[in-house]
Image (cartoon, rainbow, N blue to C red):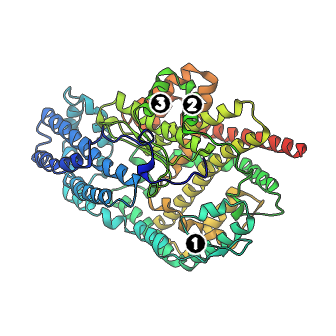
């Protein structure tokens, strides 16, 4: 199945395509819904200047605004899903453009709401917040009050909300440079065949089992980034300066404080992550040493980081088999969770197979008024099965939140977004490791486990530390020169990968290819989320029903509580280093298991 021919979408059976009719019956139905937003926006704008009249008036406005936001979500989501089916489809592109053109001005139009509410005297605001009429919005109003000192005047808020295109320019320029204008020298394989190098295939080339191809791709790729080093420095430096300017404008102590304040996360959580990972770097160094040994290298270089440690397993699965594997893996989460996973398959939430023009990768997306959808490109590999488990975790999180919360609390923050998906992945790996499997299969699974920790905990924490240092440099009046950025990044790679790793000159330019840096201070949540998921999955497997109950309640909370509070209810307290520590001890045990498994494989030769 892994080498199946890519079909046209029309050739794929309907049962393997998602059913979007619960969202909109057709493209024509979506088109008819678009202009209906205008009247609702006009109706809501009549409340400007009236929000502080009484709790009843404010409740009326907030209820209507929520209904509008639900419709906006539906209108925005549908063309995105349709375009994923075939990115070449002009109709979907036009729909997406229309949706953006309709929605962007609406956000600016309602910039008056927060300043108007916060203009109330504190006593009156508290009376509104504690009124019976506004009880369903109490947490939202308390959260708004928390941000009062950082909220500007209505005119200033409107001005800032209209600057989105300008403030996002540095990231778009960096994307355009990398995706459209950068040209990389082609390389040749051992047979003299020419291979193109691009941003799209670089990691694939770094995952090639042929070390010569990996090294050549590495040299070619970073040769081009070095040539554009000054331009990439300018785009990233501008982005950091924008962050610092916005933080000062909103009266925050730092750009990081502003970023974390949105979800009420103290900066100590960020610092604790970095400090705890630093304390557990020896486990990462053991992993690097094991990688060097398994690859049979005298020296391990950065272009060996993605090299496969074991060959692809000669195992393929049908989608029906994959479904059963996922259902078996999530059995510890209880009968109701299992029924909802079955429902996802029965109701065709999943768009299964690749087709010509389909978006790459995978995601889960949905709205309050319809089920969550899963877009994936199933090829029958164990990685595809893992992807199905991962995206099903997102979808079940979304389903639980919207089932138990009103629409204004049904979303969940990025801080907790990757937890449910990673718990499912971990449950799948643990389930497979318990089976009677040969050591090659065991090594393959352990390698996947170690790669997840390396990429999601250690590497993302390294990125988080780089962001912190870069912003602090600007905040103390320094400058982000290309030499400062290159040297700072190189030193972090040395620290995180350890003494075994040979530092080629090209490594220092890697920072400039990381798109996450243009959405500042969010990569750390991948690391905290993965560590939380590791702690939760361990608890679920060891403690059973009590841990499951708390975990499912956490998934059901949406944004009705601050993320640290809901996660603590689920069993993970990130105000202490304990969950990060526990997760990294788990990583250490996985490395030890891999070392023992590799020793058995060597002995059997």
Q: Is residue 190 above or below residue 428?
A: below
Tell me whether circle 3 and circle 2 mark residues in contact (CB < 8 Å). no
Q: Which is closer to the viewer, label 2 or label 1?
A: 2
Asked if one can make out residue 557 in the rendered structure from this viewpoint, the answer is no
Question: Badge 1: few (under 14), some or many (20 or more) residues near its Cα, within 10 Å?
Answer: some
Question: Badge 3: few (under 14), some or many (20 or more) residues near its Cα, within 10 Å?
Answer: many
Q: Examine the image and state in which quarter residue 439 appears.
A: top right
Q: Which residue corresponds to mark 2?
A: 324
N-terminal of the two: label 3 or label 2?
2
N-terminal of the two: label 3 or label 1?
3
Number of numbered discs visible in the structure rendering: 3
- Give the secondary structure at mark 2: helix
Q: Gap between marks 3 and 2, in whole Å?
A: 10 Å
Question: Badge 2: few (under 14), some or many (20 or more) residues near its Cα, within 10 Å?
Answer: few
Q: Is residue 105 above or below residue 51?
A: below
**Whole-percent x, y for residue 43 in the image:** 10, 45
Residue at 65 percent of width and 31 percent of height: 431
Q: Examine the image and state in which quarter residue 243 appears.
A: bottom left
Q: Is residue 299 above or below residue 31?
A: below
**Whole-percent x, y for residue 371 in the image:** 36, 36
Q: Which residue corresponds to mark 1?
A: 484
């Amino acid at each position: 199945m892994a080498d199946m021919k890519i079909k046209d979408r029309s050739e794929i059976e309907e049962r393997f395509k998602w059913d979007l009719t619960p969202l909109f019956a057709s493209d024509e139905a979506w088109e008819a819904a678009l202009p209906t937003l205008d009247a609702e926006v006009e109706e809501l704008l009549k409340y400007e200047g009236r929000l502080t009249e009484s709790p009843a008036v404010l409740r009326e406005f907030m209820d209507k605004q929520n209904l509008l936001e639900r419709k906006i979500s539906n209108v925005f989501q549908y063309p995105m899903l349709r375009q994923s089916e075939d990115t070449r489809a002009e109709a979907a592109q036009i729909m997406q453009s229309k949706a953006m053109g309709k929605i962007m001005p609406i956000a600016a139009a309602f910039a008056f709401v927060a300043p108007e509410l916060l203009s109330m005297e504190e006593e009156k605001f508290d009376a509104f917040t504690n009124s019976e009429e506004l009880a369903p919005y109490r947490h939202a109003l308390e959260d708004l009050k928390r941000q009062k000192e950082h909220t500007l005047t209505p005119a200033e808020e409107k001005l800032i909300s209209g600057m989105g295109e300008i403030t996002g320019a540095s990231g778009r320029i960096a994307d355009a440079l990398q995706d459209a204008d950068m040209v990389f020298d082609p390389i040749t394989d051992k047979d003299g065949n020419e291979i193109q190098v691009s941003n799209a295939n670089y990691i694939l080339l770094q995952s090639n089992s042929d070390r010569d191809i990996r090294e050549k791709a590495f040299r070619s790729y970073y040769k081009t980034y070095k040539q554009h080093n000054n331009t990439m420095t300018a785009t990233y430096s501008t982005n950091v300066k924008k962050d610092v300017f916005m933080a000062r404008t909103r009266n925050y102590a730092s750009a990081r404080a502003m970023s974390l304040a949105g979800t009420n996360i103290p900066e100590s959580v960020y610092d604790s992550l970095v400090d705890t990972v630093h304390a557990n770097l020896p486990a990462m160094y053991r992993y690097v040493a094991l990688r060097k040994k398994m690859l049979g290298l005298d020296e391990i270089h950065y272009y060996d980081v993605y090299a496969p440690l074991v060959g692809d397993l000669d195992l393929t699965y049908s989608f029906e088999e994959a479904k059963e594997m996922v259902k078996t893996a999530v059995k510890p989460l209880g009968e109701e969770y299992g029924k909802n996973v079955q429902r996802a398959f029965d109701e065709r939430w999943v768009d299964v197979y690749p087709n010509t023009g389909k978006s790459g990768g995978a995601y889960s997306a949905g709205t309050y008024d319809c089920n969550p959808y899963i877009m994936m490109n199933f090829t029958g590999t164990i990685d595809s099965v893992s992807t199905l488990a991962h995206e099903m975790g997102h979808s079940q999180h979304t389903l639980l939140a919207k089932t138990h919360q009103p629409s204004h609390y049904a979303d969940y923050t990025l801080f907790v977004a990757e937890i449910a998906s990673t718990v499912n992945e971990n449950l799948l790996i643990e389930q497979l490791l318990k089976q009677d499997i040969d050591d090659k299969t065991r090594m393959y699974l352990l390698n996947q486990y170690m790669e997840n920790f390396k990429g999601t905990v250690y590497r993302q924490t390294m990125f988080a530390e780089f962001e912190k240092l870069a912003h602090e440099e600007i905040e103390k009046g320094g400058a982000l020169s290309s030499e400062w950025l290159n040297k700072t990044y190189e030193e972090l790679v040395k620290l995180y990968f350890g003494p075994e790793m040979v530092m080629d000159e090209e490594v220092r330019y890697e920072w400039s290819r990381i798109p996450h840096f243009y959405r500042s201070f969010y990569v750390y949540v991948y690391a905290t989320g993965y560590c939380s998921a590791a702690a939760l999955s361990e608890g679920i497997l060891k403690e059973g029903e009590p841990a499951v109950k708390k975990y499912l309640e956490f998934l059901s909370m949406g944004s009705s509580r601050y993320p640290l509070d809901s996660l603590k209810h689920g069993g993970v307290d990130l105000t202490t280093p304990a969950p990060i520590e526990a997760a990294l001890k788990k990583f250490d045990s996985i490395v030890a298991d891999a070392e023992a498994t590799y020793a058995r494989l060597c002995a059997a030769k």
